[in-house]
Amino acid sequence: MNFDIICLDSLSKIVLASKPTTCLFDPLPGKLSKDLWPVLGPAVLNIVNLSLTTGTVPSSFKTAVVKPLFKKAHLDPGSLGNYRPVSNLPFFSKILEKVVYQQLSAHLADNNLFEPYQSAFRAFHSTETALAKVVNDLLLSLDSDSTSLLILLDLSAAFDTVDHRILMDRLENRFGISGLALSWLKSYLSDRTQCVSCNNTVSAFSDVKYGVPQGSVLGPLLFSLYISPLGQIIRSHGINFHCYADDTQLYVPIKADNASQIRELEICLSSVKSWMSQNFLLLNSDKTETLVIGPARYRHQFDHVTISLDSCVISQSTTAKNLGVTLDRTLSFDQHIKDITKPFFTYAI
């Protein structure tokens, strides 16, 4: 498999539709690069096509600048945990990634290689479609007077721990990517560096040996391909699931007195955690949540039902945030409406 070279018109559409972001090491601001595109276009086209035909990524495109972003104003600025690292990449590196992204996505779609229940980074899929599928299934269960158990898995720093060797093997043997396309992706992941920029001071560079590039175009798609075997594991236990990038949710109609059902769910969770450990991903048992959804007259039967994961009891919640939406035990969305309207009442007062 080889990536196809691109014409100037196609590249121009990508550039002009892109947000003019700027990295510290960009020779020109992103906005100026777009304004000067009629002049820069042929040279950039040559760089892009040379990269595609040689299977290599320019080293200057593989350097990220990480800036600490303060999470909330009321937090302690002296605590590093209150900052979120934001990774910035050169403007034209993202343009090259978008060219590859289009061709890689087309290969996956044309050959039906996407995980059916992975809604991230696919055309006509989104957090909305993921939520619509899961909520619809849960509502159907409610309509049939049944109770469902929803488990929201939490992964710690998932994008940062991807093993490149495993990813390359998966791209080749599971997704049929070979030749110069595979060489390009190997070059894209290897020899990456980053530095930290804060208060006009730049740190020394450090090598990035693991993970998919943060703030990149291809990184999230590569991560979704990395975790694609997870679907087979969950299906083998007869559990419903849906994924959006690193957000994975399991749900199943269940009866409180059915010990074998609960045991099968625990075995499934154990298999998921074991697979993640083998693939250098960390499932955070402490932050994984359980939500019992069903009629009030049945929910109390689950008060003393526990779901364990490696001797750790998963906490049972009355509400849980799922892809930005707060779900409750009856799917009324009352708490979600309160959460999103509260700032407006505060402002009015």
Image (cartoon, helix red, strand yellow):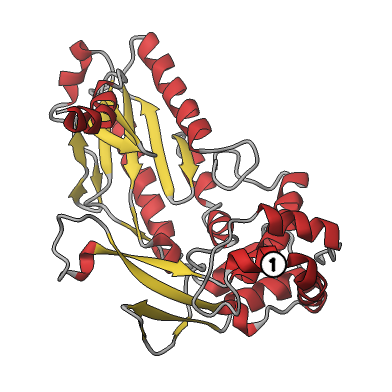
Q: Quadrant of the C terminus?
A: top left
The image shows residue 111 at horizontal and vertical percentages of: 76, 47
Q: Is residue 245 left or right of residue 56?
A: left
Q: Is residue 34 left or right of residue 297?
A: right
* Nearest the eye: 53 or 239: 53
* Nearest the eye: 284 or 28: 28
Q: Residues within 10 Å of mark 1 (few under 14, many from 20)?
A: many
Please give the name of the residue rendered at 13% of the width and 63% of the height, measured from the top-left corner.
Answer: 76
Q: From where the camera sits, is residue 179 visible?
A: no
Please give the name of the residue rendered at 50% of the width and 27% of the height, measured from the top-left corner.
Answer: 133
- Rendered view: 168 above or below 228: below
Please give the name of the residue rendered at 67% of the width and 63% of the height, measured from the top-left corner.
Answer: 34
Secondary element under disc 1, as helix, strand or loop, is: helix
* Nearest the eye: 238 or 202: 202
Task: Tell me where residue 262 sits by quadrant.
Answer: top left
Task: Tell me where residue 8 sits by quadrant.
Answer: bottom right
Task: Kindly identify which residue carries mark 1.
Answer: 96
Q: Is residue 66 left or right of residue 108?
A: left
Q: Amino acid at mark 1?
A: Leu
The image shows residue 208 at horizontal and vertical percentages of: 47, 80
- Rendered view: 192 above or below 234: below
Please give the name of the residue rendered at 20% of the width and 52% of the height, measured from the top-left corner.
Answer: 311
The image shows residue 274 at horizontal and vertical percentages of: 38, 58
The image shows residue 55 at horizontal and vertical percentages of: 76, 77
- Rendered view: 338 above or below 203: above
Q: Quadrant of the N terminus?
A: bottom right
